[in-house]
Amino acid sequence: MLRDKLKGFDIILASASPRRRQLLEGIDLDFTIENGGDIEEIFDPTMNVMLVPEYLAELKSKEFARALNHNEILITADTMVLCDNEILGKPLDRQDAVAMLVKLSGKKHKVLTGVFIRSNSKSRSFTATTDVYFRDLSMKEIEYYVDKYNPYDKAGAYGAQEWIGYIAISRIEGSYFNVMGLPVQRLYIELDKFLSD
């Protein structure tokens, strides 16, 4: 069992996301949270979009504020939404949030989360992909969500676990938890492999 293998290790989640914290707590692993530091999410525009989240998760890991001790394992992640081959990050303002939700309305989009796991001697990374289908949304529904909730800290301007997720998502193919920001089932497996390598 993974909990047994992790005895003697300290897991650090470098994320300010309350959803990632909640999801990692859900798999009963002991961990601490440290600020990963803000990075400029800049990448080569010619990069394959499917590789961007993993690249940014690795960048967050490299920019971690301090050196790791021999028994520490650092986890960083980056989530993005991809619709019509366009990356939708966190919205800049209300207008941007509304525009993103209009774009997602009535369409299938992908949620990709790149995860980077590292100690001071090795690393492992992966990307989880989930297909999400939105029903057609009215402008009134979109504006209600943007005005009543906080879409500004979420890729694609929405939280699956919030009102918009309840009324907009008609189908999901893949991990629901990935849509929330951390594919914990896959992370559990990858952490086990990381410790076995």
Image (cartoon, helix red, strand yellow):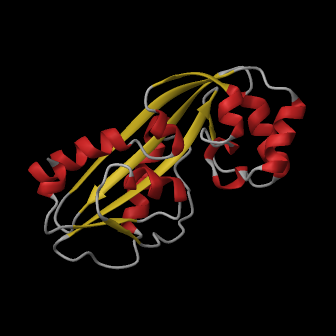
Q: Is residue 64 above or below residue 94?
A: below
The x and y percentages for residue 81 are 58, 38
What residue sits 26% from the left and 75% below the top?
68
Q: Taking the image as drawn, is residue 48 in sight?
A: no
Regarding residue 36, the answer to whether it shows in the image is yes
- Whether residue 137 sits left or right of residue 62 in the image: it is right
Q: Nearer the viewer, residue 96 or 34?
A: 34
Instruction: Determine whether 90 is above or below 17 in the image.
Output: above
Q: Percent position (x, y) of residue 77?
A: 43, 53
Q: Position of residue 104 (x, y in %)?
A: 71, 29
Q: Is residue 32 left or right of residue 6?
A: right
Q: Residue at x 56, y 56 (%)?
A: 42
In this rendering, is residue 23 above or below 186?
below
Q: In the image, what residue occupies the spot 16% across and 65% down?
A: 121
**In x, y percent, where is residue 33?**
41, 69
Q: Is residue 123 left or right of residue 173?
A: left
For residue 128, which quarter of the picture?
Answer: top left
Residue at x 63% of width, y 47% of height: 89
